[in-house]
Amino acid sequence: MIGLISATAAGAAARDRLAAAWPGRTKVYEGPVRDSVERAFAECEQLVCFLAAGAVVRIVAPLLADKSADPGVVCVDEGQRYAVSLLGGHGGGANALAAAVGDVLGAEPVVTTATDSAGIPGLDTLGWPVEGAVASVTRAVLDGDPVALRADAVWPLPPLPGNVTPGGEGAAAALHVTDRLVETGAYDAVLRPPSLVVGVGASKGAPVEEILSLVEAVLRDAGLSVRCVAELATVDAKADEPGIVGAAERLGVPLVTYAAERLAEIAVPNPSGAPLVAVGTPSVAEAAALAGGGELLVPKRKSSPEGRAAMATCAVVRRTPRGRLAVVGLGPGARDLVTPRATQELRRASVLVGLDQYVDQIRDLLRPGTRVIESGLGAEEERARTAVAEARAGHAVALIGSGDAGVYAMASPALAEASDDIDVVGVPGVTAALAAAAILGAPLGHDHVSISLSDLHTPWEVIERRVRAAAEADIIVTFYNPRSRGRDWQLPKALTILAGHREPRTPVGVVRNASRPDESSHLTTLAGLDPAMVDMMTVVTVGNTATREIAGRMVTPRGYRWQS
Ligand code: SAH
């Protein structure tokens, strides 16, 4: 819940706008300001105070407890010009809240957390637990001081700047990325990756305390951090066993269950007869821990409750980190047609793979320390292989393409190459056909198709058959790769095929460099098109038999005929 507090009439008006914009998410506190802020601070995850920053500082100062628990606080000035992230920028979500408040009120978000300003990911923003001297290590990272990176494995983390290196020559500070319990000094911070899976077996009615203390003791004895447990795993038959469900809840991790037949197939060091009789697999803890792959660190161990028989077993597996491949469409060219999600993925990646001219388009969006692997035209297969290989090595990779990366672009060769040991995320982009259509008017109002006229990878007979089908079916066509210096007869040939089924005056839109600085567009007709105005920077959109030019725009009716 977001608590809203105001003191003046203008503040109350702005407060009401926020409340109306976010129904069910806000709670208005009325009455004396100090009392309202205090109550909201105790009750809400976030506060928006339409008060002077100084006043809020004085009121909340005595209430501050801990960065991880305090609510995020945003202050908005009387003129609603600024939304200031005052407290809990990362953990409390105040930076994001300031941006959201800014969107509603037209206020400028003011964010002062250093990592955001420097484009460096805050150690506390990665979604992983972090321990130790977080502030000192962050300071060292920001100041460019050498920081030693002590990572047990490659994880798909955002990039860290160049002063954070595995060698860490001369470094006082160290950033550990490990599931092991490590000795930490005054300049060590530890990031806890979600690397451990704990397999759990329990007899009916096993108490949650027994399971939990077994898990904790096993991890402690193995020198492992309980904060790295990614999930508990067990057999389907125990999916509702209260002790196991409760232990997962207390650890704050999901419970994953597997069919007994599946577990029975997994080779384990310590099979036994009891679970085979009870649930149909000779191993629950070890097999469930191993079911998702990985290395068995701790074989099955039984609980040891005082004065009675053990009711729980557990085993610990370390899984191999999965790399992450984001296939990101950058849109047709203009910066404001790059989606926010694409930007986020570019900043999320530590390795960027792409064609040099596309990399140039977004280089300024990348975080410091991003490794850029760029190549020239024509190296598609190699780019795809490189991107997949980097992801398989565990990195967070962004593979970029113009428009939509899945349309005549990199997504296909990359995913043809990718195995199921990496995570793949696709970010759609505005493809050239859509960018051009928006410039032309509404040419795609009915069924439409894109056809690439490049016969580099596709035999011309296949292309011609598709053009013919579109012509016969009266489908609007957008031609990609329509004409280059060495390929000049394909476009006239394709237009001739369409002209066999459409009037000479059928509208044709030619858009060159859509959304780029030298954008141009021409509306002409099938009979009037001069192929010389078409090149590889161009798409050509041919209307169907119902498409018309209206007021200089290309418009296709939504039905088969124009409404009268
Ligand atoms: N993935 C890209 C298409 C790659 S094929 C996309 O989704 O847009 C390359 C062809 O796309 C070019 O020859 C041209 O026909 C077209 N194209 C790409 N960007 C364009 C733009 N900004 N304006 C006009 N055509 C464009």
Image (cartoon, rainbow, N blue to C red):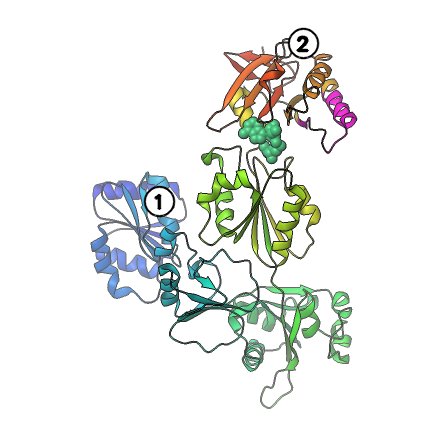
Residue 434 visible (yes or no): no
Residue 101, numbered label: 1
The image shows residue 74 at horizontal and vertical percentages of 31, 51
> Residue 462 appears in which quarter of the rendering?
top right
Which picture quadrant has residue 238?
A: bottom right
Residue 423 percent across, percent down from the top left? 62, 54
Judge left or right: residue 34 versus residue 132: left
Q: Residue at x 26, y 60 (%)?
A: 60
Q: Give me the disc on residue 146.
A: none
Whether residue 370 is in magenta: the answer is no
Q: What amino acid does circle 1 point to? A: Val
Residue 151 seen: yes
Q: Secondary structure at mark 2?
A: loop
* Range of residues picked out in magenta: 450-470
Relative image position of residue 535 (x, y in whole percent): 60, 23
Q: Is residue 466 magenta?
A: yes
Q: Is residue 23 above or below residue 128?
A: above
What residue do we see at 39% from left, 70% from top? 133
Q: Nearer the viewer, residue 74 or 171?
A: 171
Residue positioned 60% across, 57% down in the render:
323
| Cα gap from disc 2 to disc 1, whole angstroms | 54 Å
Neighbourhood count class around disc 1 (C-alpha, 10 Å): few under 14, some 14–19, many 20 upward: many
Is 254 drawn above or below residue 514 in the view shown? below
Which residue is label 2 attached to?
503
Q: Name which of mark 2 and mark 1 comes first in the sequence.
A: 1
Q: Quadrant of the C terminus?
A: top right
Assign ligand 1 to one image quadrant.
top right
